[in-house]
Image (spheres, grey):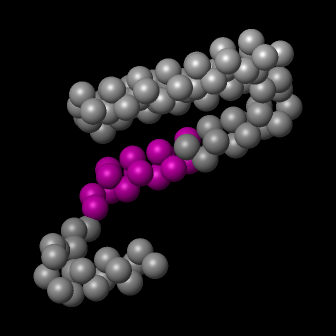
């Protein structure tokens, strides 16, 4: 669905097609490979480990994603990204603490 929509927008004059450089393609490819491997490892950990022990490590993805984005792609997180990340982590910690109190 994305390819036809993108082609239609290009045909209507909403931008121009840009061929990515070999470096950009290599970076996206490496990010894809590492992302798939990390998601697979997280799935295996959630299936085999104690969820209460594994769940906090899910939130480290935010930190690693930001660090890798800065190191590899030269990105800089803005205030909205940092605030949103803090909200997600705080909600996860709250859920873990609350579920621990019930048990």
- At 86% from the left and 31% from the top, the residue drawn is 48
Tell me the residue at 62%/38% (across/down): 38
The answer to whether 54 is drawn above or below residue 65 in the figure is above
Give the total number of marks visible in the rendering.
0
Above or below for 27 versus 66: below
Q: Evaluate whether residue 64 shows in this view.
A: no
65 part of magenta stretch: no
Give the image location of residue 94, x and y in percent: 58, 19
Left or right, 80 with respect to 96, comes to: left
Point 32% across, 56% down: residue: 22
- Whether residue 80 is situated above or below residue 10 in the rendered picture: above
* Rendered location of residue 32, percent (x, y): 51, 50
Image position, residue 47 (x, y; %): 83, 36
Residue 95 picture location, percent across and down:
63, 24
Quadrant of res 49: top right
- Describe residue 32's horizontal placement relative to residue 98 as left or right: left
- What is the quadrant of residue 58 in the picture? top right
The stretch in magenta equals: 20-34
**Res. 87 in view:** yes
Q: Quadrant of residue 35?
A: top right
Q: Residue at x 83, y 16 (%)?
A: 103
Q: Residue furthest front?
A: 102
């Amino acid at each position: 669905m994305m390819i036809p929509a993108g082609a239609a927008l290009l045909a209507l004059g909403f931008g121009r097609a840009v061929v990515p450089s070999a470096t950009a393609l290599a970076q996206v490819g490496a990010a894809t490979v590492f992302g798939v491997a990390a998601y697979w490892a997280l799935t295996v950990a959630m299936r085999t480990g104690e969820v209460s022990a594994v769940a906090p490590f899910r939130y480290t993805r935010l930190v690693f994603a930001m660090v890798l984005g800065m190191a590899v792609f030269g990105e800089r997180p803005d205030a909205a990204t940092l605030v949103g990340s803090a909200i997600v982590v705080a909600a996860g910690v709250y859920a873990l603490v609350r579920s621990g109190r019930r048990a």
